[in-house]
Amino acid sequence: QVQLAESGGGLVQAGGSLRLACLASERTIDRPFSSYAMGWFRQAPGKERVFVATISRDGADSYYDDSVKGRFTISRDNAKKIVYLQMSGLKPEDTAVYYCAAGRGGSIRSSYDYWGQGTQVTVSS
């Protein structure tokens, strides 16, 4: 099992930047952090939780939703068990609770087995 804790959310003006972090702690040793693909999802008020970005186990491959492509960058540090989401050029429509997840990867929520509690990002216009 993996426990995930997001941080780095906050209030930012449109056009600004934030870096979210997701720290993983392993409750068992048979599945190290590096064996999980990681993803970021977000959920705006009254809407479903949707895919933002994903990164492969070794960090070599990443994939983004079109709405954030070119503005957000996902990265990971397996030694530190952290995955990041660097967000720039933020827009009011990026306002949401952001969740990190660990699992098989991809853009589908059911591909992820473990979820964090989320961190709020609010972008003012």
Image: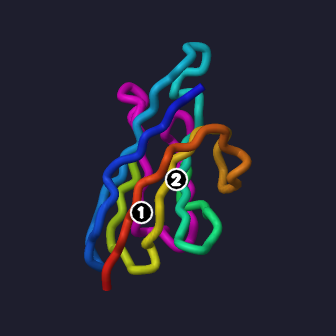
**Which residue bears the numbered disc 1?**
72
**Span shown in magenta:** 55-83
Residue at the limit of the structure toward the right, as seen here: 110
Q: Is residue 75 magenta?
A: yes
Q: Is residue 36 above or below residue 87?
A: above
What residue lies at 68% left-to-right and 52% top-to-bottom?
109
The one nearer the camera, 28 or 31, is 28
What residue lies at 60% left-to-right and 60% top-to-bottom?
51
Q: Amino acid at mark 2?
A: Trp
**Residue 30 screen position, x and y as percent:** 61, 14
Q: Amino acid at mark 1?
A: Phe
**Residue 54 screen position, x and y as percent:** 55, 50
Q: Mark 1: few, some, or many residues within 10 Å (few <14, many ≥20)?
A: many
Q: Is residue 113 magenta?
A: no
**Residue 1 screen position, x and y as percent:** 60, 25
Q: Is residue 69 above or below residue 5?
A: below
Q: Nearer the viewer, mark 1 or mark 2?
A: 2
The one nearer the camera, 53 or 13, is 13
For the C terminus, the image quarter is: bottom left
Q: Is residue 28 above or below residue 57?
A: above
Q: How many marks?
A: 2
**Which residue bears the numbered disc 2?**
40
Q: Quadrant of residue 120?
A: bottom left
